[in-house]
Image (cartoon, grey):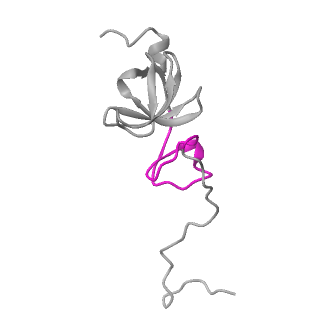
Amino acid sequence: MREPPGPERPTRRSFSLAGPSATLDPLVNAVRDDLADIRLAEYVFAPHYAAPLAMVATRPAVLRSAASKDASVITQLQAGAAFEALDFAKGFAWGIARGAGRVGYVDQASLAMASDAADGGPAAP
């Protein structure tokens, strides 16, 4: 039987993270070394998690493997296609193309908030 901490035995101030962490396919699961979809939190450990932001393609767009216009094409998105954005950087949104079931980068200028698209665009000031 373990003795409780006392004056001669300091309280332990560290812990370890233990348990299973699944290896998920990053082509179909939004998980990177630095970020993962919050819906995957019970399956993978990531430094940060993000909740998906519902967006829609406002015009035909290309889903790419990296945040670059030179990156390989994963698939094409049609105008009106649903996209769940998890990160924005370098003019690209990283997330999930729902209809295609693929993860990648889309030119941010090709996307609008889903609520704005349903209303016909952002409200005028």
In the rendered structure, the answer to whether residue 86 lies left or right of residue 4 reads left
Residue 46, position as x, y percentages in the image: 50, 54
* Viewer-closest of 103 and 68: 68
Q: Is residue 87 above or below residue 42?
A: above
* Viewer-closest of 3 and 27: 27
Residue 58, position as x, y percentages in the image: 43, 16
In the rendered structure, the answer to whether residue 67 lies left or right of residue 104 reads left
Q: State the predominant SS element of the stretch in magenta.
A: loop
Q: Residue furthest bottom?
A: 8
Task: Name the quarter where the N terminus is drawn.
Answer: bottom right
Q: Residue at x 48, y 88 (%)?
A: 7
Q: Residue furthest right?
A: 1
Q: Is residue 55 magenta?
A: no
Instruction: Count numbered badges in the picture.
Output: 0
In the rendered structure, the answer to whether residue 117 lies left or right of residue 25 reads left
Q: Is residue 7 above or below residue 23?
A: below
Residue 13, position as x, y percentages in the image: 47, 75
* Viewer-closest of 21 and 124: 21
Q: Residue at x 46, y 30 (%)?
A: 63
Residue 108, position as x, y percentages in the image: 37, 27
Q: Is residue 48 magenta?
A: yes
Task: Name the quarter where the C terminus is drawn.
Answer: top left
Q: Provide the residue span drawn in magenta.
A: 27-52
Q: Residue at x 62, y 87 (%)?
A: 3
